[in-house]
Amino acid sequence: MSTDTQSSTSEKLAVLGCGLIGQSWAALFLSYGHDVSAWDPDPKARAALAAGVQHPLAQLAELGEGAERAGQLTICDTLEEAVAGAVLIQENASENVPLKQKLYASIEALVSPDAMIASSTSSLTWSMLSEGMINKERLLTAHPFNPPHLMPLVELYGPSPAIVDRAAALYGSMGRVCVRLRKDAVGHIANRLSSALWREAVNIVAEGIADVAEVDAALVHGPGLRWSVIGSHMAYHLGGGAGGIGHYLAHLGPSQERRWATLGTPSLTPEVCAQLVAGIQEEAAGRDIPQLEAERDSRLIAMLRARDAFAAP
Amino acid sequence: MSTDTQSSTSEKLAVLGCGLIGQSWAALFLSYGHDVSAWDPDPKARAALAAGVQHPLAQLAELGEGAERAGQLTICDTLEEAVAGAVLIQENASENVPLKQKLYASIEALVSPDAMIASSTSSLTWSMLSEGMINKERLLTAHPFNPPHLMPLVELYGPSPAIVDRAAALYGSMGRVCVRLRKDAVGHIANRLSSALWREAVNIVAEGIADVAEVDAALVHGPGLRWSVIGSHMAYHLGGGAGGIGHYLAHLGPSQERRWATLGTPSLTPEVCAQLVAGIQEEAAGRDIPQLEAERDSRLIAMLRARDAFAAP
């Protein structure tokens, strides 16, 4: 983990792909004073970007983060224009290996040897994406967590520690917390953990132990809240009493393994899917998705502000 | 989920078992103005209780929760004295079925028909514990999440909705968020979710994908933070775009099932345990357990305050 908070000088950063993730990255980069040049193969997506960054920019302003003066957003008609002179190219294309590989080949023909390409991919790995590149080391996976302008986490993997250092310093200077993988893995860390937890959350509903809304409430007011301040491993360390994790593993390791064996392996059958959909409908209680997102974000902003207060020296 | 915030009148509550969980419950009950009568078979534990409640009481005062006037703590020499006149008996004995069953038999001979017995058990179920009771319905499991005076979650299960309602109203009046199970399950909800997540957290370390500290940081700055404001099911609803969870399940359900199949089933071998212990040592970076707990608690208090602000109407 690195939280490099030293202010960096303004640099030109490129954003490729102007969907929600691209908009979010662009807003973050701009708010920290970087000039952003953006491109998307779809002219409609390009045209929507200027409006699309406004909401995340306003949320970042509400958080009180960023530089005194926002950077300049340039929406480019060509890839060439977007990547010219960029120190980092944040790629947010569809999760399609040949498409991304073709894009990287085009970029490599256009940029200086030290320009970094950072893929926001959530489901693909560095090994899949780097195949066929001239300079593989310039590629790294830099997976943000949704919504990226608010969530601090960026998961990094690349084979060159020096290049990962450079990227981590840049993201860190924008309030991101970078976590580094030792080797690439589908789902990086965070989505593997999310997926593992959701499997059991689905199982609890499928088994009739509790409803969707109750499972979500248990998470939010229990482990989720605690995991917003300490990690899972550390929680077991503190659950081990004075002997910590060593004591826990020696005395309760076997019972934890038995617990693991009793966890569910549900299938997303039509019946289970119907239960989940009905359960969410009950939990949402008439709130539509934009309203639920707005509530999530205002709560996240409140939590991030509370963190800033305790993180201060 | 119920959050009954109406102020209740002061009642006599009994706390049986004066270890950490008992101390935490006692402090919570006292801070909300209830008189607490406490007993433990171990005279040393009884003697330590008056001092033991001071730290959680101070933390609750820091949170600004509770009644204007704290209740009265009475440390009793006998079980009979402790349970006499109590509307709720919070049982925090060791996780031992025959011991708890014997305790309930003693309590049933002493109390009025409508006194509730609430077990803090984390690993046992209502079905195991209620066997042999005269009035099974008076027993419920009421599992708090550690540290109980700070964490809002209480997981409730009992066969009588009316009795669970009464308990939920009482806990709810003390700032707890009660979640109800439809049927009893080992690990209730929260510990099942925690266990499922930790299994993958251990797997990521065992597979060499990332170190303990990196896994914990990814959780705290990613999914953990998000789960402190929205649940796992709701996160997939919001991850489904305009079509919500229905769209997500239809389009990404199969890939989620494939992801589940790739998650790990690690064993806590001596090698893996050594990796975890070394990883925690690195993450703790010289901080001992009391220091780590103090940091956890001050961060939790900051997060709880931020929540109170956004929960306000």
Image: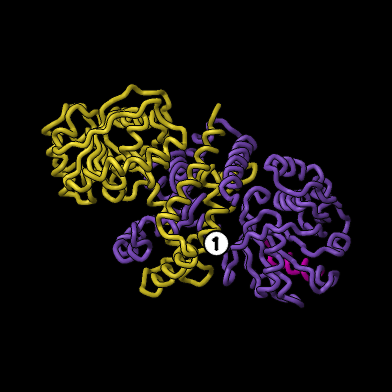
Chain colours: A yellow, B purple
Quadrant location of the C terminus of chain A?
A: top right
Residue sitting at x 70%, y 43%: B64
Is B200 colored magenta in this rendering?
Answer: no
**Mark 1 secondary-structure assignment:** loop
* Residue holding disc 1: B189
Quadrant in the picture for residue B161: bottom right
Is B99 colored magenta in this rendering?
Answer: yes
**Image location of residue B194, percent across then percent down:** 51, 54
**Image location of residue B216, percent across then percent down:** 47, 42
Q: Is residue B211 left or right of residue A71?
A: right
Quadrant location of the N terminus of chain A?
A: top left
Q: Is residue B236 left or right of residue A255?
A: left
**Image location of residue A141, percent across then percent down:** 28, 40
Could one spot residue A233 in this view of the protein? no
Q: Main secondary structure of the magenta part?
A: helix
Residue sitting at x 18%, y 34%: A82
Specify the segment rendered in magenta. Answer: B94-106
Q: Residues within 10 Å of mark 1 (few under 14, many from 20)?
A: many
Tell me which chain the residue with mark 1 is part of. B
Q: Is residue A151 above or below residue A170?
A: below
Q: Is residue A13 above or below residue B293?
A: above
